[in-house]
Image (cartoon, rainbow, N blue to C red):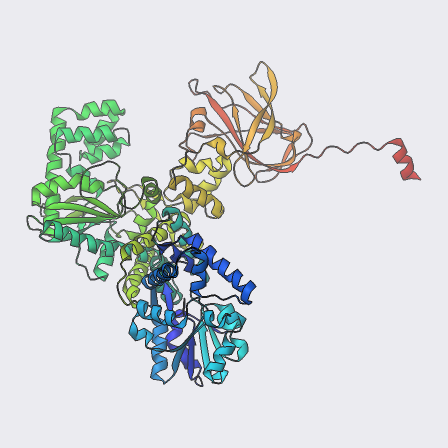
């Protein structure tokens, strides 16, 4: 792009302009950046007014100035006169200072710009600021010093503010600037982020100009969506800015230099999230030391703790990688008959193969037990056999000893130390099982610190979440945790899950069932994350560490993570497309992370209601291509736990005529077909206990119709809130056509109004009530036949 420069190229911008003797810079988003998404988001941090009041006051001040003084630019004092019309001058001055203080807290200098200013000084070139702002010169200089430090402010010569001259750069501000400078325009280089103001408004005066393209098009969209998602998760809070984005500057400076989509995904998403997480872990470790004394050992639980540990190391930490899986933690906790009984009562209705493996039963015994006792009740009774129960509890206690030996070998804590278990979360199940074991065997305290925590029961254990119950309600946490599989697969180690330990504590792993290509992609994603961590501190210059840093990184991370989970971009899905998810329960089961074909079928067959109960690993990814509205609907339903039902989505219908026959008699009627998605309708047709044949009289309504699916399913399954979009319990129908011709896949032409589709019933299922679910899309409505021409009309035509 002509007259444009990317952020990372700023330090060398003068190289292309050897004749330049003055450097002119815009201020906001060029020299000073904010850690919020948009300038007005900062108004949330004001103590005297809310965001809308402050915005309305500025609009009013500008319109008033245009009418009274024929100028569009105003001073901040004029804004606060409108905002606080009945306040004293002292009260308004205090409110103005409050805003300046908020700006200073949230602003920082962009290091590439500062490096350009230093390069200019080394060449003997003065730097000036020309800014469209409602601040005056003294206020703006003071803000730069307060936010970036006196050394940065000292690099600046003169400052020109639009509020002083009554016009912006787009309105000709540079005319009085040139008069004041008394320098030839072609000896000046001006750089700013607003093309309309900093290029189109300045270049006509003969000044050399460069547009600072802050973000690539993809980056701009991504951070805008992060802002939108953040607003859904974070209610407006008095005195707190809106949509915190501490990663903005790092993304702007580095992302254009990345050319690998996988590395870019890690840099722009995992980097901000895990960097914020590790900052929080530092604070939590310090708090635990202050509370308990002794050494606090950061213990990262493999496999999902792999990338958080690497981030911790990249930031100078020394955490330990300990291999404790859900499988080994649970199996090691079954050392008593009571513990076995509690476990079985909770999990007995799941897959008995998984249950038997969790009990550490030998494979031949487990297979015979399941074969002889396939029902949960009989299986539970067989487990209660005293001899078998002793074998189970003895095996569990042996595993517990080996697990403790593993922790001792890796960490070697002293008695009284604290093990800070670190994991992605999200229930802390491993901690629930191993905390008593580790406390007893090693004499240590145990605390769990998780990226995401929404505990399913009030265990009373020492657990906290970076994004957890202290700062988010249960619906918000559940919405975050629903799609946690994508985070797990990006953070995990490329190794099999631990299933046992040698006597000396060496981990024994099963083979990894994840494809090597997935591991290669994940390695590149993780490399991008680590690059963000290394580069993050090198891009910003702050006069002091902000007091709101904890809020800044937590809310920023929640916005980034929520955006990835609910509004993934096409380039990101291309990286994740071949990923599978390892369920990590001691078996070799993997499932695809997402499958768009399943979502498309579910939407057409059931509409938005399909999403409410759909149990998928990464459902929003499957909705890609179906529009943003669907993803936001899914997010809103989950974030706010909306009690929506199928009928809530129905606002129109089609009365579909039917012929119903049971072998003895034939009757006609209609069924109400309701809209689903993309122009499709669903007609649910009861057929009793597979008794009735159904003739669907499409010809009465349509010349052309598209039929997506014709399937039988149990009535109770159709009415359930828990949908199964994989087609479980569905049986495809075998219709015949009368007067209908298939002209393309799923597309039919009806020859006349008598055309219909005949669907015979399926085999009976022990009297179970069944229905025919017909998903179709009208293509062309049947046009009424033209009336026969009258005798007079024919005569007129002949004449």
Q: Inspect this view and state whether residue 211 appears.
A: no
Q: Is residue 583 above or below residue 297?
A: above
Give the farthest residue toward the top.
Answer: 664
Give the farthest residue toward the left.
Answer: 415
Q: How many marks?
A: 0
> x, y percentage for residue 308?
25, 54
> x, y percentage for residue 559?
36, 52
- Depth check: give the residue in front, 275 or 115: 115
Q: Is residue 493 left or right of residue 669?
A: left
Q: Residue at x 6, y 51 (%)?
A: 414
Q: Is residue 497 left or right of residue 639?
A: left
- Depth check: give the residue in front, 594 or 295: 295
Q: Inspect this view and state whether residue 666 appears.
A: yes
Q: Residue at x 12, y 35 (%)?
A: 395
Q: Residue at x 20, y 56 (%)?
A: 282
- Depth check: give the residue in front, 589 or 456: 456
Residue 703 is drawn in which quadrant?
top right
Q: Is residue 659 above or below residue 392?
A: above
> x, y percentage for residue 194?
47, 67
State which quarter of the image contains the C terminus: top right
Q: Residue at x 47, y 85 (%)?
A: 183
> x, y percentage for residue 487?
32, 49
- Depth check: give the residue in front, 160 or 498: 160
Q: Is residue 220 left or right of residue 511?
A: right
């Amino acid at each position: 792009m002509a007259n444009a420069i990317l952020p990372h190229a700023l330090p060398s911008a003068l190289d292309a302009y050897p004749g330049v003797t003055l450097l002119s810079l815009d201020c906001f988003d060029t020299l000073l950046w904010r850690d919020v998404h948009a300038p007005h988001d900062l108004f949330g941090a004001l103590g005297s007014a809310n965001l809308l009041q402050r915005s309305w006051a500025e609009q009013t001040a500008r319109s008033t100035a245009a009418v009274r003084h024929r100028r569009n630019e105003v001073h901040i004092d004029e804004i606060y006169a409108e905002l606080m019309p009945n306040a004293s001058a002292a009260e308004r001055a205090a409110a103005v200072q409050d805003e300046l203080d908020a700006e200073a807290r949230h602003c920082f200098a962009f290091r590439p710009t500062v490096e350009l200013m230093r390069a200019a000084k080394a060449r003997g070139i003065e730097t000036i600021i020309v800014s469209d702002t409602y601040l005056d010169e003294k206020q703006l200089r003071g803000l730069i010093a307060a936010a970036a430090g006196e050394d940065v402010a000292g690099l600046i010569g003169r400052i020109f503010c639009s509020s002083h001259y009554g016009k912006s750069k787009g309105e000709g501000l540079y005319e009085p600037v040139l008069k004041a400078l008394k320098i030839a325009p072609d000896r000046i280089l001006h750089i700013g982020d607003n093309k309309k103001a900093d290029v189109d408004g300045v270049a006509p005066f003969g000044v050399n100009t460069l547009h600072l393209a802050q973000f690539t098009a993809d980056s701009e969209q991504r951070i805008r969506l992060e802002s939108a998602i953040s607003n859904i998760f974070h209610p407006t809070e008095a005195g707190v800015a809106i949509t915190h984005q501490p990663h903005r500057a790092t993304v702007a400076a580095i992302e254009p230099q990345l050319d690998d989509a996988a590395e870019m995904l890690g840099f722009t998403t995992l980097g901000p999230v895990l960097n914020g997480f590790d900052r929080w872990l530092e604070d939590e470790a310090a708090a635990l030391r202050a509370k308990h004394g002794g050494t606090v050992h950061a213990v990262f639980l493999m496999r999902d703790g792999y990338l958080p540990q690497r981030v911790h190391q990249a930031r100078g930490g020394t955490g330990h990688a300990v291999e404790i899986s859900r499988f080994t933690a649970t199996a090691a906790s079954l050392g008593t008959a009571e513990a076995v009984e509690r476990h079985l009562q909770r999990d007995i209705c799941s897959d008995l193969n998984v249950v038997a493996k969790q009990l550490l039963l030998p494979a031949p015994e487990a297979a015979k037990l399941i074969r002889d006792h396939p029902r949960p009740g009989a299986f539970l009774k067989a487990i209660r056999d005293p001899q078998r129960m002793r074998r189970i509890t003895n095996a569990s206690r042996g595993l517990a000893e080996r697990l403790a030996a593993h922790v001792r070998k890796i960490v070697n804590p002293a008695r009284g130390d604290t093990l800070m278990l670190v994991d992605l979360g999200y229930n802390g199940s491993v901690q629930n099982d191993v905390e008593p074991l580790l406390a007893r065997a090693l004499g240590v305290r145990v605390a769990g610190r998780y990226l995401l925590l929404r505990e399913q029961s009030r265990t009373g254990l020492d657990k906290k979440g970076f994004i957890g119950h202290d700062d988010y309600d249960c619906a918000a946490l559940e919405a975050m945790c629903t799609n946690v599989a994508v985070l797990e697969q990006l953070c995990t180690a490329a190794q099999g899950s631990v299933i046992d330990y040698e006597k000396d504590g060496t981990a024994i792993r099963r083979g990894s069932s994840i494809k090597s290509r997935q591991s290669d992609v994940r390695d590149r994603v993780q490399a991008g994350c680590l690059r963000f961590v290394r580069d993050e501190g090198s891009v910003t210059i702050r006069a002091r560490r902000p007091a709101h840093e904890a809020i800044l990184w937590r809310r920023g991370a929640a916005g980034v993570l929520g955006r990835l989970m609910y509004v993934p971009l096409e380039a990101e899905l291309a990286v994740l497309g071949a990923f599978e998810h390892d369920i990590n329960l001691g078996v070799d089961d993997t499932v695809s992370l997402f499958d768009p074909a399943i979502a498309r079928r579910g939407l057409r067959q059931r509409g938005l209601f399909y999403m409410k109960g759909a149990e998928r690993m990464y459902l929003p990814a499957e909705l890609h291509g179906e529009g943003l509205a669907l993803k936001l609907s899914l997010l809103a339903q989950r974030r706010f736990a909306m009690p929506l039902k199928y009928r809530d989505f129905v606002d129109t219908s089609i009365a579909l005529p039917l012929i119903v026959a049971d072998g003895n008699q034939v009757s006609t009627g209609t069924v109400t077909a309701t809209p689903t998605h993309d122009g499709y309708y669903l007609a649910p047709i009861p057929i009793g206990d597979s008794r009735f044949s159904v003739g669907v009289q499409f010809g009465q309504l349509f010349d052309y119709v598209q039929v997506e699916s014709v399937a039988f399913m149990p009535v109770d399954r159709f009415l359930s809130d828990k949908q199964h979009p994989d087609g479980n319990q569905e049986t495809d129908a075998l219709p015949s056509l009368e007067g209908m011709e298939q002209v393309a896949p799923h597309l039919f032409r009806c020859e006349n109004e008598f055309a219909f589709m005949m669907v015979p019933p399926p085999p009976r299922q022990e009297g179970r009530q069944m229905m025919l679910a017909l998903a179709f899309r009208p293509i062309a409505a049947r046009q009424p036949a033209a009336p026969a021409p009258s005798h007079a009309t024919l005569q007129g035509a002949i004449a």
